[in-house]
Amino acid sequence: IKVRHLMSAETRSNPRTHFLLTRTYVWIAYKDYPFWAGIRFVSFRLLMMAYHALRAGHLSSFFRGVWQGIAGCSHIERRPVNKGTIAYVNKLDRERPNLLVRSMRHRVAPQL
């Protein structure tokens, strides 16, 4: 049996991945977060996606994702979570490896 993981090395730098993740981050921030919490959520992730897209040579896919994400917000019903949920998600994020550790994973090859 031969199995290929969706994010195998052959698919990691797929321009579609950069587009879809970028668009989804914009939609999550708009739909699930109050305004300032959404800005905090999406800002780091968009910077991260821009870096990875630039490194992989798919910056146009990143910008298309941002554009489609913003344009698609008009079709999404907002249901921001409460402050307790945001605090819980922030707690989970604090337990992740720090930025330096995560960036070292990407040193050799992008992880997207």
Image: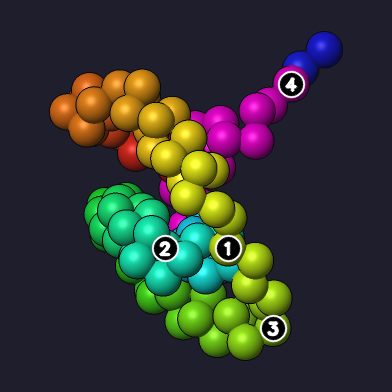
* Amino acid on which disc 1 is placed: Pro
Q: Please indicate whether residue 70 sits to the left or right of residue 6 in the image.
A: left
Q: Could you tell me the amino acid type at mark 2?
A: Gly
Q: Earlier in the sequence, mark 1 or mark 3?
A: 3
Q: Quadrant of the N terminus?
A: top right
Q: Residues within 10 Å of mark 4 (few under 14, many from 20)?
A: few
Q: Disc 4 designates what residue?
A: 3
Q: N-terminal of the two: label 2 or label 4?
A: 4
| Residue at the outermost top position | 1
Q: Does the magenta stretch include residue 26?
A: no
> In the rendered image, which quarter is residue 97 located in?
top left
Residue range (magenta): 3-18
Q: Which residue is drawn at 55% across and 86% down?
A: 71
Rounded to the nearest angstrom, the CA distance separating label 4 from label 3 is 37 Å
Name the residue at 41% across, 70% down: 35
The residue lying toward the viewer, choosing from 82 and 27, is 82
The residue indicated by pointer 2 is 38
Q: Are marks 2 and 4 in contact (CB under 8 Å)?
A: no
Amino acid type at circle 3 is His
**Mark 2 nearby-residue class (10 Å; few <14, some 14–19, many ≥20):** many
Q: Are marks 4 and 3 in contact (CB under 8 Å)?
A: no
